[in-house]
Amino acid sequence: MSRKKTKGKSVLPGFGLTMGITVTMLSLLILIPLASVLAYTFHMSWSEFWELLRRPNVAQAFATSISCAFIAAVVNSVFGLIIAWVLARYDFPGKRLMDGMIELPFALPTAVAGITLSKMYSDEGFLGKLLGAVGIKASYTKVGLTIALIFIGIPFVVRALQPVLEKLPATYEEAGTMLGAGRAYIFARVMLPELTPALLTGFGLALARGIGEYGSVIYISGNSEKEGTQVVSYIIMQKLNSGSVDYEGAAAIALILLLVSFLLLFAINMIQIAAGRRTKQ
């Protein structure tokens, strides 16, 4: 009997204390601030809430944020897969440096990234001149906005795929080659099904980050209502920085962003659970 009781105990005791600290920190840092968003939103009536969301600039900002974030997430999924494949499957000089540079968008302040990108892709910038030569204007357009979202979203896809690729045996590819299958067939029918959960996870994280991004896009987008380059986060900042601060309106728009992010994260968790069940079978 005593052996069974000892076996069931945790190596590191103190569950009650650590659980209490966890719940307290979770409440103070996440739950209470999120609840305040709901509280401010409830100060508005339903008619005021819907009237706010149907305003042309707000509706346009949501359309711009979601569409540009979606395009950026798709681009990141393609190139993030390629980068993760190279880092996981090949050894070459400078590999560790390249691997570390993937984390740069996480470490770099988003405002610094926005200033740098807006300068590089302006009409006088190096990359802006190259794009201008083929008739593409990047700075202060949705093109530049999407480029900024690609920059801040690429690490999510690479870091989601890289561990899966590193654990995926190379024998899968070798077996397909020995059976006479081509590279495209092996990738589409053997590798891609194994990578799909991680790829969708990275896509969802990049999309969620892009929809609510502010610092890296505020300079390069131009924030023009006429050109349709205002993002949702900029509309929120407008309401908080105006002469008459509109906390209720800002909270209502933030609530929609919160719901979108929650649904995306919920979908990501469902994908991970399904992938875990598939692996155990």
Image (spheres, rainbow, N blue to C red):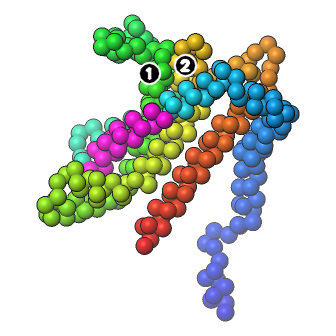
The residue wearing badge 2 is 229
Rendering quarter of residue 48: top right
Q: Is residue 71 visible?
A: yes
Q: Is residue 71 magenta?
A: yes
The residue wearing badge 1 is 143
| Quadrant housing the C terminus | bottom left
* For residue 49, side relative to residue 83 (left or right): right
Q: Residue at x 55, y 39 (%)?
A: 208
Q: Nearer the viewer, residue 10 or 164?
A: 164
Judged from the image, the secondary structure of the residue bearing numbered disc 2 is loop
Disc 2 and disc 1 in contact, CB within 8 angstroms = no
Q: Is residue 166 magenta?
A: no
Residue 216 point in image, percent of width and height:
53, 24
Q: Nearer the viewer, residue 163 or 80?
A: 80
Q: Amino acid at mark 1?
A: Val
Q: Amino acid at mark 2?
A: Thr
Q: In the rendered structure, which segment of residues is drawn in magenta?
A: 70-89
Q: Nearer the viewer, residue 157 or 41?
A: 41
Residue 199 point in image, percent of width and height:
42, 49
For label 2, the crowd category at 10 Å Cα-Cα, with few meaning under 14, some 14 to 19 and many 20 or more, is many
Q: CA distance from mark 2 to mark 1?
A: 10 Å
